[in-house]
Image (spheres, helix red, strand yellow):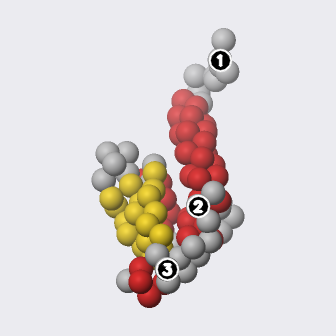
């Protein structure tokens, strides 16, 4: 038996379902980012079709990736839209930030 919502609140039900799915995914990606390490490198953000939707570089991969998934950080509308579409990411470690270019 799940949570029952009054008939007048279908949009709230949809929102809460979306929010729970979004937060679960975000927390999972945040945890993955924490485990990457502080090496410099390149990161590739992927959508639900495993398509690369963004490529970035970082002098500290963990710090840069965490910045996308920490909910309290102020993000631009463009970045918010990007984060909503990220379901996974890959990293390529380099010896320096310059090499990541």
Q: Secondary structure at mark 1?
A: loop
Residue 41 got which mark? none
**Mark 2 sits on what residue?**
36
Q: Residues within 10 Å of mark 2 (few under 14, many from 20)?
A: some
Q: Quadrant of residue 39?
A: bottom right
- Seen in the picture, residue 11 relative to 91 is either above or below; the reply is above
Q: Viewer-nearest of labels 1 and 3?
A: 3
Q: Is residue 98 or residue 78 the one in the foreground? A: 98
Residue 77 lies, in percent from the top left, at: 48, 68
**Mark 1 sits on what residue?**
2
Residue 76 lies, in percent from the top left, at: 51, 72
Could you give the CA–CA distance between mark 2 and mark 1, rounded to whole angstroms? 37 Å
Is there CB contact under 8 Å for labels 2 and 1? Answer: no
Residue 74 appears in the figure: no
Return the disc, 3 or 2, that comes first in the chain's sequence: 2
Q: Residue drawn 66% across and 11% down?
A: 1
Q: Secondary structure at mark 3?
A: loop
Q: Viewer-nearest of labels 3 and 2?
A: 3
Q: Quadrant of residue 53?
A: bottom left
Residue 95 got which mark? 3
Q: Residue drawn 37% across and 51% down?
A: 47
Could you give the CA–CA distance between mark 1 and mark 3, rounded to whole angstroms? 51 Å
């Amino acid at each position: 038996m799940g949570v029952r919502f009054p008939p007048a609140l279908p949009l709230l039900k949809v929102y809460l379902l979306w929010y729970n799915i979004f937060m679960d995914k975000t927390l999972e990606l945040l945890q993955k980012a924490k485990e990457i390490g502080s090496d410099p490198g390149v990161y590739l953000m992927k959508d639900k079709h495993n398509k690369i939707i963004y490529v970035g570089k970082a002098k500290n991969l963990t710090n840069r990736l965490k910045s996308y998934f920490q909910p309290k950080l102020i993000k631009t509308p463009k970045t918010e839209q990007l984060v909503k579409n990220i379901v996974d990411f890959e990293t390529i470690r380099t010896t320096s930030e310059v090499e990541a270019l």
